[in-house]
Image (cartoon, grey):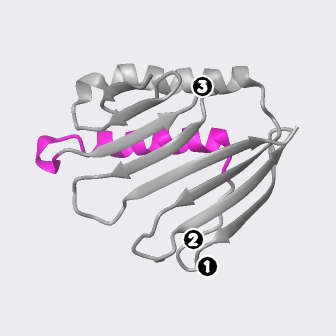
Amino acid sequence: MQTPLVAIGIAALTAILTGCGDGDEYGTVDSELEEARAKWADAELSNYQLVVTSGPNQLTADGCEWTTVVENDVVTSAVVTLGSEFGCEPEEYSVERLHDLVADLQAEVRRFDASEFGKHTLDVDVDARGVPVAIDFDLANGDDEELAYQVDLTPTR
């Protein structure tokens, strides 16, 4: 069962989060992100392959796909497996890096939380292990900073 949350955050099991500029709700959200980090630590998965896929964007019509291999909690391989070199910069994704990305996106929403900016979007789905499996972000400022990621994690040992 999914739990809808207002503001930005990460919930237990799978949650759908919608962002808005209401600063009163950020304390709860920060604790949800910490809960996801704790679940990931408890999962004790140190060997996995992570595939992060983004949809088409302003730089590449194909979107991007990054495949990262993590062994003993260290990124050992990170390649762009779909998309142009111009639009898909190399990234070393790990679950910890995805948690940091969500925290960075939270900070962006906070930075523009005044009502004149409008309603922002940050939707994050998290699985039972604390892995962000989908991230959808868009500030209401009209800039092209949209981000939509799908994440697939496969344990390798």
**Residues rendered magenta in the picture:** 93-118
Residue 143 coordinates in the image, percent (x, y): 28, 64
Whole-percent x, y for residue 64 in the image: 56, 67
**Which residue type carries mark 1?**
Glu
Q: Amino acid at mark 3?
A: Ala
Q: For the residue labelled by badge 3, is the local secondary structure a helix, a strand or a loop?
A: loop
Residue underneath mark 2: 88
Q: Quadrant of residue 15?
A: top left
Callout 2: 10 Å neighbours few (<14), some, many (20+)? Answer: some
Residue drawn at x 54%, y 20% is: 35
Distance from the alpha carbon under mark 2 to that under mark 1: 5 Å
Looking at the rendered image, the disc whose residue lies closer to the viewer, 3 or 2, is: 3
Residue bearing the label numbered 1: 85
Which residue: 30% across, 31% down?
7
Q: In which quarter of the view is residue 26 placed?
A: top left
Residue 10 image position (x, y, % from top left): 46, 29
Location of residue 11 with respect to 77 vertically, above or below: above
Residue 6 falls left or right of residue 95: left
- In which quarter of the view is residue 76 placed? bottom right
**Pointers 2 and 1 in contact (CB under 8 A)?**
yes
State which tag comes first along the sequence, 3 or 1.
Answer: 1
Please name the residue that numbered disc 3 is placed on: 128
